[in-house]
Image (cartoon, helix red, strand yellow):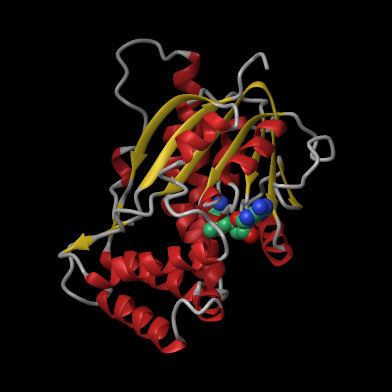
Amino acid sequence: MGRDRTKARGPPPMSFPPSRSMLLREVQDNMTEAVDERVKRYILDGTDQDLRRLLSISQESAEMARTVLRRVGVQEGWSAIDCGCGPLGGLAVIAEMVGPSGRVVGVDFSEPTVQKARSVASTLGLSNVEVVQGDINDVDPATLGGPFDLAYSRLFMMHQQDPVGTLRKIAALLRPGGWLVAQETLRTPPPRSHPDVEALGVYWDLAHRVMERVGVPYGAVEDLPRSAREAGFEIVGMSGQFWVMDPALGFDLHASTMAAARDRATQSGVASEQEVDELVGTLRAAGGGEYGWVASPFFLDLLLRKPLTA
Ligand SMILES: C[S@@+](CC[C@H](N)C(=O)[O-])C[C@H]1O[C@@H](n2cnc3c(N)ncnc32)[C@H](O)[C@@H]1O
């Protein structure tokens, strides 16, 4: 919403015959537009708050995912796995990139989330996508139809208690030379707005303390490159991205993320119900205030490759 997508769309001016890859990119961009529109409609029609939040995040971060996936040269016909796919995650973007001859398996350990993901994939007409319930730390590569050419993780590694162990499991799902693309959010700095509002930093810290209380190591994402090497991956690329949003949408997404963690925050003793509710209220109210923009969290992008030889 906050970004001008029209600039990224449409074919570039061509003064020479387009190559196959340019034509393929054009076809992908047109497909992208169609799926994007269907996701938007789904979000607008939805009544489930948390589903809308996660679909909005997928929609807002779709271009960010495409940018990194293009860097690994995802090809038509590839098989891919989206680790902790949520109700959509990277499924639509990867499904477009691998095309009808490719295959995408979304894995999530939450049964209600898997049901939602199946319903979303079917509504969006993603015929090359299947969604399986399972814990990435336990799944058997053979039952998922692996080994895969590509694994994708977004907002997933930040929930794992043993990052090296989980990365080893993901490596076991890949063929030699297969890729893991990870897009995970840094603990610091927190997302910010202009002018900046303290509640963004408070909620971001609180959400991380909830995860740390259940055993996620402090700074797990900051440490991912080291964990990835320890798990046997080669680091092919490291970069970072964030995007900015219209304040109404951006503050609503951050408020909804805090609201989604309410039960876990109170049950773990990290905050009282009143504290969480006040924070959610402050973030929501900021959406109607005098702000120029709100940033997404800051994402660390990692391009990791399983070595060709063990
Ligand atoms: C914050 S959501 C992110 C969803 C999605 N990747 C996206 O970018 O929108 C994290 C998801 O990972 C799932 N999850 C967390 N740990 C998991 C594990 N070990 N195995 C499978 N799913 C997991 C959760 O159920 C949840 O749906």
The answer to whether residue 64 is visible is: yes
The answer to whether residue 9 is visible is: no
The quadrant where residue 15 appears: top left
Residue 3 screen position, x and y as percent? 29, 50
Q: Nearer the viewer, residue 25 or 293?
A: 293
74 over 85 or under it: above or below: above
76 over 131 or under it: above or below: above
Q: Which quadrant does the N terminus fall into?
A: bottom left
Residue 20 screen position, x and y as percent? 50, 15
Residue at position x 44%, y 63% in the image: 208
Q: Nearer the viewer, residue 32 or 63?
A: 63
Residue 46 screen position, x and y as percent? 56, 71
In the rendered structure, the answer to whether residue 60 lies left or right of residue 123 reads left
Q: Nearer the viewer, residue 113 or 158?
A: 158
Query: Of all residues shown, which one is farthest toward the bottom?
Result: 274
146 over 122 or under it: above or below: above
Q: Nearer the viewer, residue 164 or 109?
A: 164
In the rendered structure, the answer to whether residue 152 lies left or right of residue 6 reads right
Residue at position x 76%, y 47% in the image: 138
